[in-house]
């Protein structure tokens, strides 16, 4: 079977499973950088499964190992949110990143690094160049003729990234690594999407994307940028990756509202990113605030 895009899929029965032969041929040695690739039909959460496996046998899951699934029934998003997908409606995968000789303080860039990798893969495979990254980890696209949704306007979330650090069970200073979960909605109908601001590639004008091709592109994009980051000792600026993030981040330059974990709501202008990838906001009162975590809403042109 070729790697080419399939015709438009109109039902679950027609939507193809991930193709292990295509994925392994494209991603594993000698053609690709991924040392281990496990593909399952159904799993509770690729993220939970990979973290558990890493803790039990860390040496069996080297840098850039992957678990992918046709369906996950207990998927987890940021801040503990649930995320489920209909069978064969989305790509769901988790990848181990084990940065060598990079200070753990620089790992705060990993969600943005993975997010921009996913954005660039969607742009390439789905031919949607307007796809962008909503800080810190949402893959989004503006659909100008869509109905307005409170806090989102006409933006739609196509997917996202979840990064979890796995501590060293022996208590060492350096973690075992980071597990990066990525999910992108591919073929769900509007009725299958969980919230009004969600979108799938099918609902925004790309109904014929083959999940194996998209997942291949996401993983190639992610591993390429991970390796580049490592080659530059974890410097996002020296590697040029910080510039890629800024170019892809649609939050920057916008008037926004941020819901902070403390319950505080902050309004202001998304001024830029600091040296750790945190969002810098100029508040309505003129103060500069650095946001480490929060939900960005009301993204609109400034």
Image: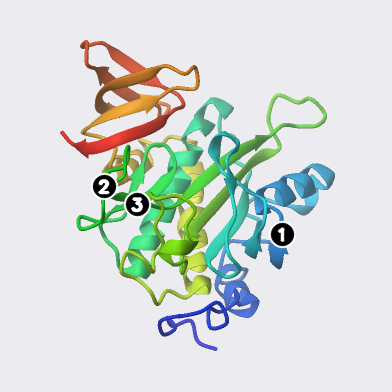
Q: Residue at x 51, y 67 (%)?
A: 216
Count of labels shown?
3
- Residue 190 makes an appearance in the image: yes
Tell me the CA gap for discs 2 and 1: 34 Å
Q: Nearer the viewer, residue 177 or 51?
A: 51
- The mark that comes first in sequence, 1 or 3, is 1
- The mark that comes first in sequence, 2 or 3, is 2
Q: Is residue 290 above or below residue 88?
A: above
Label 3's element?
strand
Q: Residue at x 43, y 54 (%)?
A: 118
Locate residue 173, reporting x and y percent. Answer: 70, 24
Tell me the CA gap for discs 1 and 3: 26 Å
- Residue 274 makes an appearance in the image: no
Q: Which mark is residue 148?
A: 2
Locate residue 144, reporting x and y percent. Answer: 20, 55
Locate residue 246, reporting x and y percent. Answer: 29, 39
Please report contact status of discs 2 and 3: CB closer than 8 Å, yes or no: no
The answer to whether residue 48 is left or right of residue 266 is right
Q: Quadrant of the rendered structure where residue 120 is?
A: bottom left
Q: Quadrant of the N terminus?
A: bottom right
The answer to whether residue 6 is left or right of residue 180 is left
Q: Residue at x 36, y 37 (%)?
A: 238
Q: What residue is shown with label 1?
A: 43
Q: What residue is shown with label 3?
A: 156
Pointer 3 local density, CA inside 10 Å: few below 14, some 14–19, many at least 20: many
């Amino acid at each position: 079977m070729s790697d080419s895009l399939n015709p438009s899929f109109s039902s679950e029965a027609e939507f193809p499973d991930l193709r292990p032969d295509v994925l392994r041929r494209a991603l594993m040695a000698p053609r690709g950088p991924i040392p281990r690739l496990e593909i399952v039909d159904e799993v509770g959460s690729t993220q939970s499964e990979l973290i558990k496996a890493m803790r039990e046998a860390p040496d069996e899951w080297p840098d850039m190992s992957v678990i992918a699934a046709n369906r996950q029934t207990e998927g987890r998003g940021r801040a503990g949110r649930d995320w489920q997908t209909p069978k064969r409606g989305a790509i769901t995968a988790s990848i181990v990143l084990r940065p060598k000789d990079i200070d753990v303080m620089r790992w705060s860039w990993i969600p943005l690094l993975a997010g921009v990798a996913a954005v660039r893969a969607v742009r390439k495979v789905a031919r949607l160049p307007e796809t962008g990254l909503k800080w810190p980890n949402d893959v989004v696209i503006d659909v100008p003729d869509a109905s307005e949704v409170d806090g989102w306007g006409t933006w739609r979330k196509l997917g996202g990234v979840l990064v979890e650090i796995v501590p060293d069970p022996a208590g060492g200073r350096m973690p075992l690594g980071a597990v990066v979960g990525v999910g992108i909605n591919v073929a769900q109908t509007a009725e299958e999407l969980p919230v009004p601001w969600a979108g799938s590639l099918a609902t925004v004008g790309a109904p014929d994307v083959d999940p194996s091709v998209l997942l291949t592109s996401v993983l190639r994009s992610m591993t390429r940028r991970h390796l580049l980051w490592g080659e530059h000792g974890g410097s996002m600026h020296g590697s040029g990756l910080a510039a890629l993030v800024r170019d892809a981040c649609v939050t920057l330059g916008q008037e926004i509202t941020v819901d902070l974990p403390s319950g505080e709501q902050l309004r202001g202008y998304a001024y830029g990113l600091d040296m750790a990838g945190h969002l810098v906001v100029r508040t309505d009162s003129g103060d500069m605030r650095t946001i480490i975590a929060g939900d960005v809403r009301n993204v609109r042109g400034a």
